[in-house]
Structures are given as structure tokens and as C-alpha cells.
Image (cartoon, grey):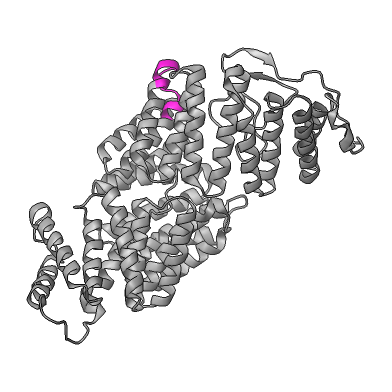
């Protein structure tokens, strides 16, 4: 958790205040934490009678016992019981205030360790409620910590937008107490930048990251490791926004800082990022050089079977695919798969799943959808269906939907898209451009299953989102317009289809030119509709395949390659 010079959290980056230690507060001074006169806890203490909760010495004793029990890992449930009773004692004896807030933080942390996140949320909301920053820096610290812990817990539930609101509330309190240029504010700004990257809100992420760098320049020594980390994050943001030159500038500066600090592994990781930028700029020779530098370092420092080596192989496979060297591309994919098939001890399953997903995108690109689908299914098996993983799983399910669609297994495609959409709605990504694209893909699957009313609803929701996120003239928005026009036509809503096609052609002629492969098809469809408008539609139903264009499968394939490979964005 950013911005706190306080005891390390026992798990999951959640702040758990230690009532027996001294805490460095917002003003940088050391003061004793509340209720400093506490009896020492004994491991063999007998359970405390509920009737004794009115004893003012009991709350501190139980809280210390809860922390000791939880920290030892002996019995989280017993620790939870102690912490809950400590909170009850504090509420009875001293009412709302710092002691109660701190004990509630501990209760929430134990709930999270047990996977009971919803209960943790309710406890943290109560902890925030009983903390009043006007009572001094201790109380401000408690409220700030409550908001940050609540944000982390919402993130574990997959409620990413709600978590950002919590972090922003914490930042507001921190700024009011410390001022806007305190180094601890920089840490919280960086935390928020990372959170916004997770939900693909790159403009907001850029603003917070810029603020972090501004504060660093004021307080930190030049060329610090912290500055390098911030520049890597800024490079990631610029890359996502398509500003590759700015991204490259930040990565080069970060690399220079890490070289000066002797961080070889970090330099290699940055070289991979530099290679990615060169690849995006079609500077292929420079990209290969950067990847090979990283590969040499990773092999020598981590071993030839480490997942970091596999990740470089995947980058090289993508590069050789894009340069038309398919044999080399497939060879690097196979090398990466050999590493993932026998993972080293201690390697987390999420890292392997991410690598398999990236390889699947390359197999998809070389028109091997069955192999790509097989890899995605393996990746799914490695991930636990927990709230924190739902956004990642949704990305894989969406990619699987594309694969199923390509091989004409429309029912399975529809089910994969539907599952992905449900997870994305639950995780708060209902307004992202990626969510709009998934809706569009599910609409195409619905059309193939002759669910026209459902397809229209999906295309309409996708249109609303993409208009807001991408603009009226963006190619993704126009693609949804085209699909929606075809669906309206199939439903007999001729005027709506005509209006939609007229808009598409106007935008293409004025903004994008007429060289787009769909332009002639859309122009012909509009001419046919205008010819038939005004008289009874007494004709045989058109083939939905024709309505959506003879290249609908190829279009879906291309969209899948471009969009799904990086759906589960990492920081």
C-alpha cells in the first residue's frame, strides 16, 4: 500500500496496524499508537467471556492476541474471533475512534486471508465511517488506510472501478493532510496510475504517472530506481495509446538508470519493452537486437528454462510472423511451449497461462485456430475462477469465442462470449472499448444462430460504448454500424438500415477514403435498400451470411488477432 511508513502487511498488500508498535505518521514524527498500556498476550490464554467486553483493558489485549495468532499462521479463524471481540470491546468502551478503526482493519485483513471478501468490505466501510481526519494525523492515517485497504479488497472482488474510487478517496485525504507534493503522495499517485491501466483508462493513468514523476524530481535523487520504475509505467501507458516515440524515450531513460544501478535483470526486462516498441514501429532489426540482448541476460542469470526466456521466445515468434518468416516463428513458439510444459518450481500458474495465451494469438494469426483454441483451454485450466482473476479469464474466454467462431462452432462461440461478458460486467468494465468489441463479437455469433433480436441489442450496446470510447469515425465503431445495419435489414427495419449505411458511407468518403474493402459492399447494399424502400418487402429472406458480408469470417479472424492478444493487460 502506498504512502504509509507503517508495519508491513501480512498478506495481500493490506494494511494491518500493529497496536504495539510506533507508527510514522503523516507529519513524519514517531508517536505511540493508541492504547499503549497493554498486557502481554499468552498463547495459552483461555477464551474471554463475552460479559467482560466492558473492561477497557480487554480490547488492546484481544487485538494483540489476534495479531499474534494471525501472524503465526496457527488458526486464522481463532485470530478472527479475537479480532471481532476486540472490536466489540473497543466499541463498548471508547466508541467510534482510532482504536475501533484499527481493530476493524485487522478483522478485514483476516477475512481477506480466508477469502471472505464481501464481509471484509462491510467491515472496512465501518472502519472508514468511525475514522475522522479532523481529530488529527492518527485518524487521517486510519481513514486513508481504510480507503486503500477497501480499494484492494474491491480489486480482489474484481470490482476495479469501485477500487479506483476508493483509492481516489484515500489520495484526497492524504493530499489534504500532507500537501500535494509529499513523497508518499507520489506513491499513491503511482498506485492509481497502475489501477487505471488495469481498466484501460490510459489518459487518467498518464495524468497520475506524470504527477508521480513531478514529485519524484522534487524529492528524490536523480536517476533513482523509483524513477526508472515510473518511467517504465509511463512507457507502458504511451505504448497503449499508440505514442511509440514517447514510450521509447521513457524506456531508454529507464534503461540508463538501471545500468547505472547495476540492475542487469531489470535492464533485460526493459530491453524487451524496447524491442516491443521497435516492433510496433516496424524497426525489425533493432527489435531483434533488443530481444537477443534480453535473451542472453535471462539465460545467464535465470537459466535456459525460466519463463522469462520463454517470454522472449514469444516476442521473437511474433516478430518473425510479422516479417513473413513463419518457420522461424513457429520454431520459437515450440521453444516457449517446451519451457511451459515443464515449469520450474515456484513459477506461478498465472505466468504460464499468460504465455500460453500469447502463443495462441500467434497460432491464430498463422491460421491454426484449433491449436490456438487448445492452448487457450490449457490456459483456462491453470487459472482459478476467483474474483481477482475474472477479468483475465474473461479475456481468454473472449479469445476462445473468436476461435470457435472461426471454425464455425457458433453455439460454443456464443457461450464463450456470453460468459466473458458476464464477468466483464461484474468487474466494472462495462464502459471500456474492449467490452464493446466483445459485445460486437457476441452479436455476430447471435446472428449466425438466427437470434436477430438479441444480435440487434448487442450491436446497439456496442455502438453506444464505442461511440463514447472511440468516437463516431473510428473503424471499430463503423464496423458495429455495418453489422447493425445488416441486422436491421434482416429484421425488416429498412429505414433504420438505410440511415445507418448512409452514415457509414459518408464517414468513409469524408474521413477515411473509399479504399476500404467494405466500402463497395456497403455502397451496393445501400443502393439495394434504397431501391426497395417505399414498397412492400415481399421478398425471400436474405442469407445472413450475405447480409454481414461474404468476408465476415475473415473479418472476425483479423479482429481477433488484433484485439484479443493483449486483452488481459498486465502491468
Residue 265 shown left or right of residue 552 in the figure: right
Residue 38 in the image: state x and y as whole percent. 82, 22
Looking at the image, residue 26 lies above or below residue 281: above
**Residue shown at 33%/66% (left/top)?**
457
Residue beneath the point at 76% across and 44% down? 76
Residue 310, compared with residue 24, is above or below; it is below
Image quadrant in which you'd find residue 44: top right
| Magenta residues (range) | 215-228
Residue 12 in the image, given as x and y percentages of width and height: 61, 41
The quadrant holding residue 138 is: top right
Q: Residue at x 30, y 62 (%)?
A: 460
Q: Nearer the viewer, residue 35 or 297?
A: 35
Q: Nearer the viewer, residue 76 or 228?
A: 76
Foreground residue among 25 and 96: 96
- Residue 120: percent from left, percent from top: 65, 43
Q: Quadrant of the C terminus?
A: top left
User: Number of marks in the image?
Assistant: 0
Amino acid at each position: 500500500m502506498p504512502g504509509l511508513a507503517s508495519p508491513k502487511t501480512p498478506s495481500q498488500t493490506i494494511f494491518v496496524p500493529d497496536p504495539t508498535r510506533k507508527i510514522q505518521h503523516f507529519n513524519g514524527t514517531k508517536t505511540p499508537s493508541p492504547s499503549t498500556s497493554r498486557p502481554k498476550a499468552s498463547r495459552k490464554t483461555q477464551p474471554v467471556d463475552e460479559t467482560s467486553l466492558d473492561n477497557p483493558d480487554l480490547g488492546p489485549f484481544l487485538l494483540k492476541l489476534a495479531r499474534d495468532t494471525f501472524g503465526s499462521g496457527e488458526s486464522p479463524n481463532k485470530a478472527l474471533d479475537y479480532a471481532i471481540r476486540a472490536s466489540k470491546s473497543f466499541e463498548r468502551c471508547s466508541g467510534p475512534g482510532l482504536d475501533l478503526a484499527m481493530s476493524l482493519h485487522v478483522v478485514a485483513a483476516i477475512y481477506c486471508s480466508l477469502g471472505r471478501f464481501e464481509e471484509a468490505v462491510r467491515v472496512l466501510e465501518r472502519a472508514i465511517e468511525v475514522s475522522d481526519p479532523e481529530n488529527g494525523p492518527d485518524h487521517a492515517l486510519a481513514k486513508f488506510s481504510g480507503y486503500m485497504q477497501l480499494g484492494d479488497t474491491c480489486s480482489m472482488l474484481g470490482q476495479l472501478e469501485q477500487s479506483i474510487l476508493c483509492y481516489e478517496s484515500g489520495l484526497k485525504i492524504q493530499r489534504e493532510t500532507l500537501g500535494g507534493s509529499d513523497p508518499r503522495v507520489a506513491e499513491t499517485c503511482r498506485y492509481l496510475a497502475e489501477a487505471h491501466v488495469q481498466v484501460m483508462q490510459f489518459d487518467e493513468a498518464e495524468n497520475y504517472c506524470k504527477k508521480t514523476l513531478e514529485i519524484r524530481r522534487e524529492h528524490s535523487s536523480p536517476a533513482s530506481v523509483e524513477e526508472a520504475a515510473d518511467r517504465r509505467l509511463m512507457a507502458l501507458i504511451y505504448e497503449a495509446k499508440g505514442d511509440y516515440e514517447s514510450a521509447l524515450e521513457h524506456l531508454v531513460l529507464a534503461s540508463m538508470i538501471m545500468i547505472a544501478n547495476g540492475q542487469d535483470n531489470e535492464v533485460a526486462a526493459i530491453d524487451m519493452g524496447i524491442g516491443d516498441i521497435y516492433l510496433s514501429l516496424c524497426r525489425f532489426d533493432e527489435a531483434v537486437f533488443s530481444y537477443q540482448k534480453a535473451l542472453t541476460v535471462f539465460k545467464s542469470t535465470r537459466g535456459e528454462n525460466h519463463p522469462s526466456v520463454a517470454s522472449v521466445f514469444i516476442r521473437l515468434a511474433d516478430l518473425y510472423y510479422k516479417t513473413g518468416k513463419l518457420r522461424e516463428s513457429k520454431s520459437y513458439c515450440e521453444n516457449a511451449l517446451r519451457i511451459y510444459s515443464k515449469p520450474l518450481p515456484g513459477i506461478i500458474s498465472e505466468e504460464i497461462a499468460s504465455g500460453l495465451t500469447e502463443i495462441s494469438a500467434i497460432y491464430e494469426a498463422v491460421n491454426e485456430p484449433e491449436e490456438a483454441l487448445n492452448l487457450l483451454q490449457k490456459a483456462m485450466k491453470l487459472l482459478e475462477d476467483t474474483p481477482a482473476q475474472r477479468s483475465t479469464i474473461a479475456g481468454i474466454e473472449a479469445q476462445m469465442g473468436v476461435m470457435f467462431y472461426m471454425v464455425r462452432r457458433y453455439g460454443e462461440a456464443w457461450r464463450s462470449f456470453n460468459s466473458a461478458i458476464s464477468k466483464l460486467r461484474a468487474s466494472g468494465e462495462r464502459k471500456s472499448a474492449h467490452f464493446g468489441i466483445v459485445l460486437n463479437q457476441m452479436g455476430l455469433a447471435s446472428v449466425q444462430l438466427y437470434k436477430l433480436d438479441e444480435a440487434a441489442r448487442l450491436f446497439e450496446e456496442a455502438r453506444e460504448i464505442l461511440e463514447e470510447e472511440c468516437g463516431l469515425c473510428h473503424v471499430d465503431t463503423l464496423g458495429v454500424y455495418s453489422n447493425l445495419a445488416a441486422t436491421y435489414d434482416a429484421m425488416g427495419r429498412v429505414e433504420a438500415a438505410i440511415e445507418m449505411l448512409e452514415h457509414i458511407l459518408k464517414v468513409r468518403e469524408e474521413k477515411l477514403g473509399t479504399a476500404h474493402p467494405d466500402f463497395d459492399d456497403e455502397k451496393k447494399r445501400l443502393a439495394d435498400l434504397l431501391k426497395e424502400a417505399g414498397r412492400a418487402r415481399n421478398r425471400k429472406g436474405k442469407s445472413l451470411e450475405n447480409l454481414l458480408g461474404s468476408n465476415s469470417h475473415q473479418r472476425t479472424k483479423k479482429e481477433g488477432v488484433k484485439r484479443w492478444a493483449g486483452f488481459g493487460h498486465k502491468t
